Structure formats: C-alpha cells, structure tokens
Image (spheres, rainbow, N blue to C red):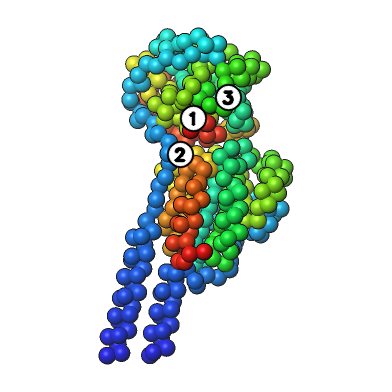
Amino acid sequence: MKKQYAVTLVLASLVIIALAAVAGSGSSVSDLPAPPAIGTVIDDFKLPDFDGKEHSLNSLKGAKGTVVIFIATKCPVSNAYNDRMEKLAEDYKAKGVNVVGINSNNTEPSAEVKSHAAEKHLTFTILKDDGNKIADRLGANHTPEAYVIDTGGKLVYHGRIDNAQNPANITSSDLREALDEILAGKPIQKTTSVAFGCSIKRVS
Amino acid sequence: MRLSILFVTLLIVGSVAGIVAPAQLNGVGSVRAADIREINLDGLKKILQRDPKDTRPLLINFWATWCDPCREEFPDLVKIDADYTAARLNFVAVSLDEVADIKTAVPKFLKEMKAAMPVVLLNVNDPEPAIKVVDAAWDGQLPATFLYDKDGHVVFRHFGRIKPDELRAAIDKAVGSKQ
C-alpha cells in the first residue's frame, strides 16, 4: 500500500513537471517585419533624397548590381562604417555596382541626413525613407544593414558589411566578398549574415 | 519510508516551484556594476550552459550603451533585479559595447542607472557566432532578453524593448510564485 502510494506520488510529481514544462514553452516576440528570402525579386520603389528629389530604385541600379545600405546619422556603429561605406561606393562604382544609402530613422530628418553626409564625406546617394516603408518592406532592422540586388532585381545578399566595428579587427568582409563573387560570375558563398548595429527608429 | 516519500516529494515539487535555489552567481561575478567582467565566446557559452547545481531561472539581457531602446528599458531591468533576489533569479546583463568602453561608457551608464545586477562585456571580434550560439532566431537586434528555466529551456524571449509586465509574468512563472 505504502509502495503504491509512493509510486502514485512520484507519478503525480512527474505530471506536475510535465505540465510546468508545457506551460513554460518559449515565447518568441519581435514586432519587426521579416526580410525577403534570398532570391526574391525586389520591386521597384521611389524615395526622395535628402534634398527632396525623388529617385526610383531602378534609376539608381548599377550595370552589374546594386547595394542598398540602411544607415544612420547618430548610431555609433553606423558611423564607424562611414569611411568603409564611402570607400566601398568608390571602389565598386568603377566596377558597375552602385551603392545607395537609405535613412529610415524617424528621429533623423532630411536636413540632418544632408549635413551628416557632408560632414562625413558620404558622396553616394542617400534616400530618406519617411515612415520606414522601405525598411519594413525589406525587413531592415539595423544600421548598418546591407542588401545586394543583382541585375535581374533579385536579392542575392543580406546582412552585415563585415564582422567588426573597429576596422583593425576585420576578419570577414562579407559584403565585398559577395560583390566580388557577383562580378566574377560566381555564386555567392555566404548569402546572409547577421547585421549588427543600432535598431532603426521606426514611427510608432 | 514515509520520510523518503516526503523527501522525494519536496525535492520534485520544490524544483518545480523554484524554491530549492542555492544563492550562486553561476561563476558570473560580483553583483556590483564596478566589477564588469570581460568574457569571450567560451565565457558566454559557460553562462548559457549553467551550473547544473544552480536551480534558479537564468535571465540574460543583451544590451549596449549606444543602443537607445536598451537604455530606455534599463530602468525596468534595474527594478526587476531589485524585486527578484539573486537567490531566486540569476540575472546577467551582457554588454555588447566595444571593449574600449569597459572602463568608461559602460560603468558610467550603469552608475547612472544605479544598476546592481552582474554585468559582463562580451569581447568578440565577430558578434555573429555569439548571436548564433544564443538563439538561431535572433537576428542580432538589441536589446534581446532571454529567460531560461531551471532546466535550461527558453521560457521567454524578446527582441527589442521589453514589456516589463510580460517579463515579470514569465519570471513569476519560472521562479514558481508571484513576487
């Protein structure tokens, strides 16, 4: 009788543990939109630059491909990449790849984006995404966060520029490697990476 | 026999309720913000693997001083740290600031916040492996908050600024009682 009681008690306890495990199953919460899958055709869109002049994505495409980078004026991580982004734009313009910046932060108005670009010597086109519609469409959550679109309009790379804020610590130049593979007519080995930086300040 | 039944029952129910909780810090360090410790990827893995003898739920918040929503939510985390004692909840705040900030921006911010939870700074050249180690679903967004139960299962995760009531409800459930 005592043995039966003990077994019942242990079984009851195990049931409690199982119930607790089920009740505590992990919740995953993120309010942000997901990015399109690699290979998805990115539909054309129009945005104004920081002077208010409207551009379409198609009008800014390079002959060999296009890089879209979400950037910020105040984010220290994005700012750590200013020189690298400008150099990237210079290096690849000659190779037929155009770099386009997009500022989707609702906390950074066009005038600030313009003065920041002048101060940091950013010469590539920077678009202002008021209402973060394009950030939402591309599932961009960070600054900096890069997208590479091929000549067919397909997304072929999405993620970081490289692995390190501090240029001295770069061991993996993911974006440049993806572009070099495109230009060499090779498949991109690493099509996605984890973009790391400040969150895009969306409209609430 | 009755004593052994009582012991087994208390052990099992106690584990579920989270009341059998040794006051260990899981090797993470001091509770003072001044003692921010630098860890590498292995150090992060060690925190995630936990000490098997430690039955407390583990709360990890990844943040950085340059991250606005991290700064905005930090007062809520300080309150949570104060409300749930270290004997019941193992809370570790993992800074992803640059290592150069370990003696400057990070302690300055923690002092402003009057933070008292254990804080470590993850010093890695490449954040991607660390992010993948924590959660394959995490895209690197900061802040990121994870709560693990005593068995190491994720029972709450949130990317972006936490909703304190949601986190507190998850902690209450994990520690086994209402605070």
Q: Residue at x 40, y 12 (%)?
A: A58
Q: CA distance from mark 1 to mark 2?
A: 21 Å
What's under tag 1, amino acid-wise? Val
> The disc labelled 2 sits on which kind of residue?
Asp
B103 versus A96 height, above or below: below
Identify the element where label 2 is drawn. Answer: loop
Residue beneath label 2, please?
A: B139
Same subunit: marks 1 and 2: no
Q: Earlier in the sequence, mark 1 or mark 3?
A: 3
Mark 1–mark 2 CB contact (< 8 Å):
no
Pick whichever, B159 or B136, lies toward us: B159
Report the quarter where the N terminus of chain A lies.
Answer: bottom left
Circles 1 and 3, Cβ within 8 Å, touching? The answer is no
The residue sitting at 40% across, 79% down in the picture is: B9
Residue A75's spot in the image, x, y percent? 60, 30
Q: Secondary structure at mark 3?
A: loop
Mark 1: give few (<14), some (14-19) or many (20+) Cα within 10 Å. Answer: few
Q: Nearer the viewer, residue B35 or A201?
A: A201
Please name which of the two marks, 3 or 2, marks the residue nearer to the observer: 3
Q: From this viewpoint, is residue B51 visible?
A: no
Q: Nearer the viewer, mark 1 or mark 2?
A: 1
Residue under numbered circle 1: A203
Depicted B75 relative to depicted A199: above or below: below
Of all chains, the one bearing label 2 is B
**A23 sits left or right of A130 in the view:** left
Q: Position of residue B99 (x, y in %)?
A: 66, 42
Residue that numbered label 3 is attached to: A108
Q: Chain of mark 1?
A: A
Q: Which x, y percent locates residue A180?
A: 46, 21
